[in-house]
Image: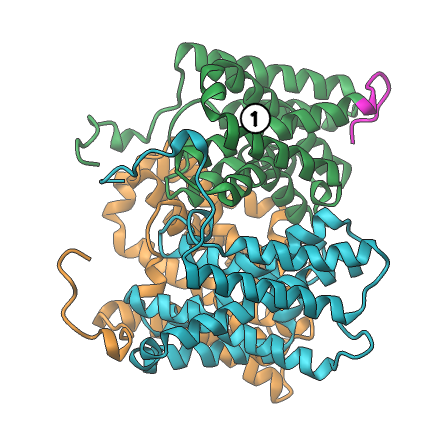
Chain colours: A green, B orange, C cyan
Amino acid sequence: MLTAAGVETDLILWLNLAATFGFGLSGGLAGVRARLDLFGVLVLAAVVGLAGGVTRDVLIGVPPETFRDGRYLVAVGAAGIVCYFAAATLDRLGRAVLVFDAVGLSLFCVTGASKAVAFGLGPAQAVVLGAVTGVGGGILRDVLLREVPMVLRSELYAVPAVLGATVVAVAHEAGSDRGAWALAGAAACLLLRLAGVRYGLHIPVAPSERRPPDPDA
Amino acid sequence: MLTAAGVETDLILWLNLAATFGFGLSGGLAGVRARLDLFGVLVLAAVVGLAGGVTRDVLIGVPPETFRDGRYLVAVGAAGIVCYFAAATLDRLGRAVLVFDAVGLSLFCVTGASKAVAFGLGPAQAVVLGAVTGVGGGILRDVLLREVPMVLRSELYAVPAVLGATVVAVAHEAGSDRGAWALAGAAACLLLRLAGVRYGLHIPVAPSERRPPDPDA
Amino acid sequence: MLTAAGVETDLILWLNLAATFGFGLSGGLAGVRARLDLFGVLVLAAVVGLAGGVTRDVLIGVPPETFRDGRYLVAVGAAGIVCYFAAATLDRLGRAVLVFDAVGLSLFCVTGASKAVAFGLGPAQAVVLGAVTGVGGGILRDVLLREVPMVLRSELYAVPAVLGATVVAVAHEAGSDRGAWALAGAAACLLLRLAGVRYGLHIPVAPSERRPPDPDA
């Protein structure tokens, strides 16, 4: 997808694998906290690491790519095993895991959007697929653990993904698929996500619901 | 699908877009009520408006059609924004939204069944796909909001969709794919759904469970 | 998939239909217990009987096979109707239903793995797809009924499926796709699953969580 001049394909592959591993840590840790067994922890790591990309490919209508490439399975398997045996250590590295997750989000949103335009889908679809690739895994994680998905109700998590994907989609519409735009989109996503974490930004609920939260809601 | 003599293709497209918008309103309102943020409300609108058709196409084994056509994304995006800013107004139009939703159900069940027979699937598959197209979005909405899907446990909602799809499947088996049968199926679905709402019809739980509901269930 | 010398194709078909029916019983009973209506019971039966195989085919990137073959729809429909009208009788046959389910798991894990290698996927993918085919339906059943999936947190359920799929994948890597290996894999899965039920085996939660369970968790 991102093989344009100036972008090292190997670099993209390794970044993607690192992002998948980072997302896998997020899923595996959630599984450990929910007291799942080893199999459950591995499933959660795989779901968060792979589900966004699989959903993207199903929506495009092509066989899921990350599933076919065994290295991605190795990445999520390793993430799950690390979480299972070293959850306490990962907790002490809390902020590092958060940064890892933000890097994953940034890479996934631009690879999702890049793949959409490469398959001839329009800019709106590219933005949606970028967001789906970035946040799909986290939504499925929360559904499996019986929670209303975090990304739908709090934190500035989806908006950075939409921003990153929009950079790619707009550049494509303007006639350029250069890898530099993908890097710019990823950087924009990463900065906005980290700023959101740092300053506690979030987008509001609907005007009609802006009362003090119900204490037993 | 429904281009047979006497049916205006443009009309079908606009009805489908209207149905998608109506389903989007249903999803968006549920998102507002669950105190999701703007992104969450848009996701819920998209899920209810598009997931049934996407699931249908995945089960047939073709790239999801409504996702490729940007107009459907516009329809669910508009529905989500309307819900976010005007949820209170929509509440006052409660009955109108219900009718909109019933029209959407009626159109989706017959387009789902028509697409199944057009791709050579059998009558049982056509009925299942008609139902999936009609109720799939609502099931996913309830899963995301952490509720046992309404359509699986109460109200006469799926049966009208099955009826509408059955009309199309039976007509196809009898040798006719005329658009008039699709319209007849949609009308049958719409009438049964509205009668169900009006008279509070529902289908019973299993005989073994017909005790007074457990107070802490 | 399993047409190799010495394995009767008709036998495999009937075993697959029996497994689908058995999984359908498991889903339908869960639906009856959750006080779903007849439509909900049928949906649960279909989900548990078919979702694993559908997910496997989507991950491979081919149209879902069991959905196209009307006999599988008949099997899950029959299972749903039996559950709806005879749930009390099935409860008295509790152990028989459990064995039925274990047979289904055994067959599904080897047919999933066999299909993966037949489509040229690697051994890791074959094991994952064998597990997905075996446990996917049960996970979706629990999500629809708003429970953290049983298979992710307790009982020795996924490990037998992984074992059965591994036998097929290893045999394929070693150069043999003979049906006898599929039967051996299914037998290994069945034995381990029944031993797990008999002796209450389970795999542990992560070391960091091995405190006495929280009483209100």
Residue neighbourhood size for the residue with mark 1, other residues' Cα within 10 Å, grouped as few (<14), some (14–19), many (≥20): many
Element assignment for label 1 = helix
- Quadrant housing residue A52: top right
Whether residue B163 appears in this view of the structure is no
Residue C172: x %, y % from top left: 80, 58
Q: Which residues are magenta?
A: A1-10
Residue B168: x %, y % from top left: 54, 78
Image quadrant holding the C terminus of chain C, namely top left
Kindly identify the amino acid type of the residue bearing the numbered disc 1: Ala
Image height check: is C85 above or below A147? Answer: below
Q: Residue at x 53, y 54 (%)?
A: C158
Image height check: is A9 above or below B14? Answer: above
Please state which of residues B184 and B131 is positioned toward the viewer in this rendering: B131
Residue A23: x %, y % from top left: 57, 29
Left or right of residue C201: residue A67: right
Image quadrant holding the N terminus of chain C, namely bottom right
Question: Outermost residue, front direction?
Answer: C199
User: Chief secondary structure of the magenta span?
Assistant: loop
**Residue placed under numbered mark 1 in the picture:** A161
Residue B165, magenta (yes or no): no
The subunit letter for the residue under badge 1 reads: A
Q: Residue at x 63, y 30 (%)?
A: A20
Please state which of residues C23 and B146 is positioned toward the viewer in this rendering: C23
